[in-house]
Image (cartoon, rainbow, N blue to C red):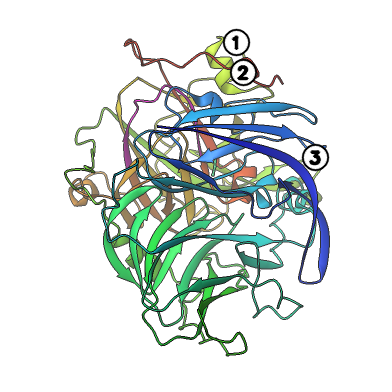
Amino acid sequence: ADVKRYQFDIVMSNVSRLCHEKAMVTVNGSYPGPTIYAREGDRVIVNVTNHVKHNMTIHWHGLKQRRNGWADGPAYVTQCPIGSGGSYVYDFNVTRQRGTLWWHAHIAWMRATVHGAIVILPAAGVPYPFPKPDDEAEIVLGEWWHADVETVERQGSMLGMAPNMSDAHTINGKPGPLVPFCSEKHTYALQVQSGKTYLLRIINAAVNDELFFSIAGHNMTVVEIDATYTKPFAASIVQLSPGQTMNVLVSADQSPGRYFMVAKPFNDVPIPADNKTATAILQYAGVPTSVVPALPQTMPATNSTGSVAAFHDKLRSLNSPRYPAYVPLAVDRHLLYTIGLNIDPCETCLNRSRLAASLNNITFVMPRTALLQAHYYGQKGVFAADFPDRPPARFNYTGVPLTAGLGTSLGTRLSKIAYNATVELVLQDTNLLSVESHPFHLHGYNFFVVGRGVGNFDPAKDPAKYNLVDPPERNTVGVPAGGWTAIRFRADNPGVWFLHCHLEVHTSWGLKMAFLVEDGSGPDESVLPPPKDLPKC
Ligand code: C2O
């Protein structure tokens, strides 16, 4: 195993897209930011130096950070922010994981411009469990706003209104030629050679949009999601929610030419949807760039919940002797969390109210110091460890839209979990205000997605239909609009771990909470001591 060292300088950079130039926060001046390369078993050390006026933290999305929440990154959850002029060293091991993950700012909405890929190759000498590709490329999907991130965030969260839609979606930071405003030079082209096979490492780094991705004329073979291998299957269109990653194999086996790659939103709310499409080009070697690219196939409708469900039903853990799926079969702790959108009184807001969001009708309030520090040092008064295991009252979660009882309760409440307990969490969408799909991300763990359905979760019938053999293993999962998703994990990573919707606007509205996983009694079962340079609040 190696030590991989990186220097991340947080700087202001002038970036222009679609004839608009803006100064924005980047890492080392690049957008998307630099890729981290490591092998399974390596230690990664990233020194982050903050040269801008904004506070900063970096999250290594999907890295488990066992016992080492200090390197996880969410502001006020595991650390206080790195202030202007400050530095902090993220020091972590890549253990029993390989595939594609990503890193992003985890404070305010800074991740809109501060994000990049993490490529974890198998340990030296260990092959992929699929035919070796000739080459690899990262495909980072994102969103571009002409406005400052702060302005977009203010509208989406502080004024309590729906967020500004982005001005473009992007593929590796570029909107592509189908966007009509001087986008020609802002087009990503993936160079391929006839007859060769490529591993594409796709990341959805968008702020508020789930996305479909496809390549004209070419099938993809899905081999990995969220840095876990899957049973390979062919797909012409794949779907990724913000936070999710996916490796696909693509063979350059069509007649040499130019083919559009497309990223288009999936958005199933009944309000006007952002449907701007980003494009890039799959470019065969030797084909002149004057050749008109083959048009993309017909993409699913923006609100095509059915095609998303069908795609997710095909995802299975590889579950091979070398990469077994350790699905918890017995459950120590059953949790049911309802997802609600609420209306909350707000003195400073337009209309004196704001949109809010909640789990079990609790809208999470961020503390002023970091939860992990408060836990480690036994500091009182920062949080309560009394998050309820079930919603406050039984109701028809997905029935007619509820317009009464939209209020929510505010609190910094954590759920305490015993070390090594097996946990089942059912996330149940509700029709408070409206149904909507929500990509949920759990820090510190991978989990198994054992079940998924529409309507109300039925504890008497639905568990009989679970897949406990080869369910997909992930760190971020979609809860279908007006439906539910059941996940299981073993709580073998002590610390404070954030659970939140990865649509940034919903996180801002309070759709988040944290687990407090207690220390075990064994020698390697407790939270490590914090590093000396841990920032102070
Ligand atoms: Cu990718 Cu808590 O985030």
Residue 379's disc is 1
Q: Is residue 220 magenta?
A: no
Amino acid beneath label 3: Glu
The residue drawn where x is 72% and y is 54% is: 161
> Residue 198: horizontal and vertical position, in percent?
40, 66
Residue 339 seen in the figure = yes
Density class for disc 3 (Cα within 10 Å; few <14, some 14-19, many ≥20) is few
Distance in Å between CA atoms under marks 3 and 2: 24 Å
**Which one is nearer the viewer's eye here, 325 or 77?**
325
Distance in Å between CA atoms under marks 1 and 3: 31 Å
Q: Which residue is mark 2?
A: 382
> Residue 315: horizontal and vertical position, in percent?
30, 58
Q: Which residue is mark 3?
A: 347
Which residues lie in the magenta part? 487-499
Mark 3 vs mark 2: which is more N-terminal? 3
Amino acid beneath label 1: Gln
Q: Reply above or below: 465 against 413.
A: below
